[in-house]
Image (cartoon, helix red, strand yellow):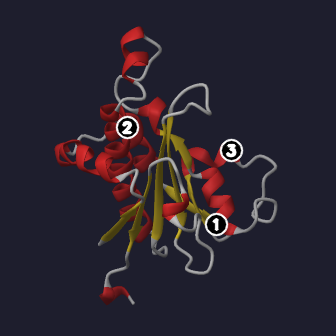
Amino acid sequence: MIIESMNEAMRPLRLLAQPFVESGSLDPRMQAEVVEGLTIRDGCLLFVSQLHNIRHSSVTSLGGPTGFEGYINKLPLDQLIDGADRSASWLAFVGTSEWAARCLAQGMMLGRGIASAAADLGSKPVDVWISVDYGPDEEYPSAAFRFVTYRADDLWAGDLAAFEQPVFRMTSQLDHRDG
């Protein structure tokens, strides 16, 4: 089971994303993240594909396991969704509500795959975070996906309502039969 929560800025995007989620068409580049898998290293659940990002970082240097996972398990949805390129038509599409809904939908489908893969590893529940930033503080709108192991005493982000940009959280739950 997955529990969804979001701030008010995300609510309209969640409705717009639903048809894309129902299509069930996860972009092949994101599907590859699920297929490549997850691993547990130093008590942290990590994308195998992102292990190269560890370099000199450590659990301690990034504020503990949740910070470490959040740093390593980050993907740029805006660069990975189908059609992402630097063409004029794509650049005109970026930053629109449909673009944001497509990013959210892809992140949601990826998050479900990650939750399933984590459960297969016997891992604890996961929190998936998806954010959309329309700018103008950044030079280019962006959408980010990240996941962390759910730790009630160490959440990745606190109060969702405190964020201006749209923020979405999916928390997987262990089946009650699993303990």
Looking at the picture, tell me which residue is in the foreground, 53 or 20.
20
What residue is shown at x 36% (from left), y 56% (from top)?
113
Q: Which residue is mark 3?
A: 53
Q: Please report the residue visible at 39 percent of the width from the left and 56 percent of the height from the top.
A: 8
Q: Position of residue 172 (x, y in %)?
A: 38, 70
Q: Position of residue 163 (x, y in %)?
A: 54, 55
Whether residue 139 sits left or right of residue 99 in the image: it is right
Q: What secondary structure is found at the residue carrying circle 3? A: helix
Residue receiving disc 1: 66
Q: Nearer the viewer, residue 94 or 163?
A: 163
Is residue 158 positioned above or below 10 on the image? below
- What residue does disc 2 label? 100
- For the C terminus, the quadrant is bottom left
Of the residues tagged 2 and 1, which is closer to the observer? 2
Give the side of residue 44 with respect to residue 160, left or right. Answer: right
Q: Quadrant of residue 26?
A: top left
Whole-percent x and y of residue 166?
44, 49
Distance between mark 2 and mark 3 Cα atoms: 26 Å
Q: Is residue 123 above or below residue 10?
A: below
- Distance, label 2 to label 1, CA atoms, is 26 Å
Residue flagged by tag 1: what amino acid is it? Thr
Specify the amino acid type for callout 3. Asn
Q: Quadrant of the N terminus?
A: bottom left
Q: Residues within 10 Å of mark 2 (few under 14, many from 20)?
A: many
Residue sitting at x 62%, y 33%:
137
Q: How many marks?
A: 3
Between disc 2 and disc 3, the foreground one is 2
Q: Earlier in the sequence, mark 2 or mark 1?
A: 1
